[in-house]
Image (tube, rainbow, N blue to C red):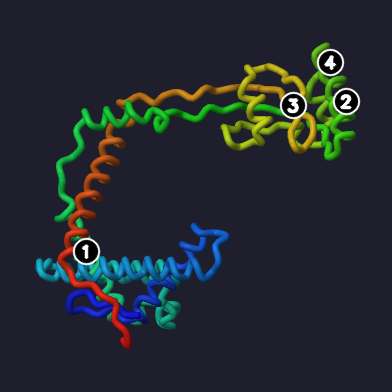
Amino acid sequence: MAIKVNDHVIPDWAIEGQAQSLFQSLAEKMAGKPREVIQMAAIDLAKDRLIDQTLMSRESQKRDYKVDAVEVSKQMKQWIRQNGGKKAFEKGNHPVIKDKESLRKEITNQIRFNMLLEEESKCEPVSEEDARKYYDSRPELFKTEETVTASHLLKKASTEEEFAQAKKVILEIRDKIEKGDEFVDWVRKESDDSGNDGNLGEFGRGRMVPEFEKAAFSMNSGELSEPVRTQFGWHLILVKDRKTGTLTSFDEVKQKVKDYLTERRKDTKFDAFLDQLKKEASIEEVSGI
């Protein structure tokens, strides 16, 4: 089904080509969904994008932006390099760009789009006061990650009988370590996960199974855990180091926050402009094209 935007028709083959180019990225985001559902989503997104591009193209042409031919040529060469080189380009396998003329048109339109975007998204930069309000309202965004560096000794188990036996062994080993034996020696002798001497390295929250994480993050540096049961069996955990998350100062992130909020403000302004173009346009699906 083609789409007519004012006096311009977007043919069905253009929609299908755009959908094809979007399919892979959507498939990754929609992992597990049926292919037909992803295909429908790709077609819907392709329609939306092509409608936006058509409206922006017509609007940018009305404004008669001057496009530098040298810049177009430069971007064409860059596009060809990024899409497999000259030989791949000459095969014409791209779903939308088939030859140099179509590429030149696409690049020229994109430059005009960018000029339109720049003009219609102009806004006052975000003030330091607004940036500070955002910083104060979202402290979790500016904290460094809380981490633990630890080693473990594991006795694997899968049945209740095995869990009972594994816990008995773990308790005996813990008693010996508490009396002076080296943790690493017992890892080498008894652990069912003795690779790298049981070292797990540094990890943050969400990296380990919940029971293991809860125990590890409740301990201090140098502390040996009580036996910890997980789906894998029974563990002893030795915490070697622990780093608490610290709040990055406002001064360190101030400019990044201002830049982020300014870009968000620009996006909001341009989206409103594009919505207005759509309201004023005649957009309908047409058949037979």
Which mark, residue 169?
2
Circles 2 and 1: CB distance less than 8 Å?
A: no
Which residue is tagged 1?
113
Q: Where does the N terminus fall, quadrant-wise?
A: bottom left
Whole-percent x, y for residue 50 in the image: 30, 70
Query: What element does badge 2 sit on?
Result: helix
Q: For residue 152, what is the image quadrant?
A: top right
The extreme bottom residue here reads 288
Q: Distance of mark 3 from mark 1, alpha carbons?
A: 59 Å
Near mark 2 (Cα within 10 A), the count class, few <14, some 14-19 or many ≥20, is some
Circles 2 and 3: CB distance less than 8 Å?
A: no
Which residue is tagged 3?
228
Front residue of 23 and 244: 23
Instruction: Tell me which amino acid carries mark 4.
Output: Asp
Q: Residue at x 20, y 66 (%)?
A: 56
Which residue is tagged 4?
175
Mark closer to the observer (3, 4): 3
Q: For residue 212, what is the image quadrant?
A: top right
Instruction: Report the side of 259 relative to 232 (left or right).
Output: left
Residue 189 seen in render: no
Circles 3 and 1: CB distance less than 8 Å?
A: no
Front residue of 100 and 265: 265
Of marks 3 and 1, which one's residue comes earlier in the chain?
Answer: 1
Instruction: Tell me which amino acid carries mark 2.
Output: Val
Near mark 3 (Cα within 10 A), the count class, few <14, some 14-19 or many ≥20, is some
